[in-house]
Image (cartoon, helix red, strand yellow):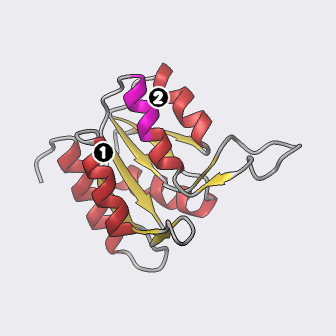
Amino acid sequence: MNVLLVEDDQNKGTQLVNFIKDQFPDANIELVRSLQSAVRYIRKNHADIVLLDMTLPNYDAGPDEPGGGTTHSFGGREFLKQMERFQINVPVIVVTQFETFGQEPKALRLPELDAQLRRDHAPIYQGAVYYHASIHDWREKLRDAMKRALAIDL
């Protein structure tokens, strides 16, 4: 199984890689850290599933711009749009540590964003999992979501 992990937070990325290795020992994991590198990867390489952060920098950090440019609250949504644009039909699960996205008055809470993504990006979008470093129930939820998306027996 080939997993594309799109995550810019180093600690969360490490936790997710360790989780994938533990739950799916045969998985090949590609970790990218920005919207542009994710789009570039998914266009050129095969992935069986994508684990996607919602809030992403536009491009990879570099010496001239250590933060990777503007961070987009809805970078994950833009990634889904690009997948559809290039007709890439790979299941995507959003894994986020935020409960609210964007700025008022257009801010969305995670359940609202989840419903919007289900409506606008079905069947690619498979759901969202709320990640919290000190609360571990995300692991079971993500494992179950991945198995459903990959049609693996629970």
Examine the rendered structure and indicate whether residue 125 appears above or below residue 81.
Answer: below
Badge 1 marks a residue whose secondary structure is helix
At 30% from the left and 29% from the top, the residue drawn is 89
**Can you give x and y, in whole percent of width and height, for residue 106 in the image?**
50, 65
Examine the rendered structure and indicate whether residue 143 appears above or below residue 132.
Answer: above
Residue 83 highlighted magenta (yes or no): yes
Q: Amino acid at mark 2?
A: Ile
- In this view, which residue lies farthest toward the front? 105
Q: Which mark is residue 37?
A: none
- In this view, which residue lies farthest toward the top? 44
Residue position for label 1: 120
Q: Amino acid at mark 1?
A: Asp
Q: Which residues are magenta?
A: 80-86
Question: Are dots 1 and 2 in contact, CB under 8 Å?
Answer: no
| Real-space Cα separation, disc 1 to disc 2, in angstroms | 20 Å
Mark 2 surroundings: few (<14), some (14-19) or many (≥20) residues within 10 A: some
The quadrant in which the N terminus is found is top left
At 49% from the left and 42% from the top, the residue drawn is 78
Dominant secondary structure of the residues highlighted in magenta in the image: helix
Q: Which mark is residue 42?
A: 2
**Can you give x and y, in whole percent of width and height, for residue 105 in the image?**
52, 71
Examine the rendered structure and indicate whether residue 103 appears above or below residue 7.
Answer: below
Residue 56 highlighted magenta (yes or no): no
**Can you give x and y, in whole percent of width and height, for residue 57 in the image?**
65, 49
- In this view, which residue lies farthest toward the left? 153
- In the rendered structure, the answer to whether residue 146 lies left or right of residue 136 reads left
- Mark 1 or 2: in front is 1
Q: Quadrant of residue 128?
A: bottom left
- In the rendered structure, the answer to whether residue 79 lies left or right of residue 145 reads right
- The residue closer to the viewer here, 94 or 15, is 94
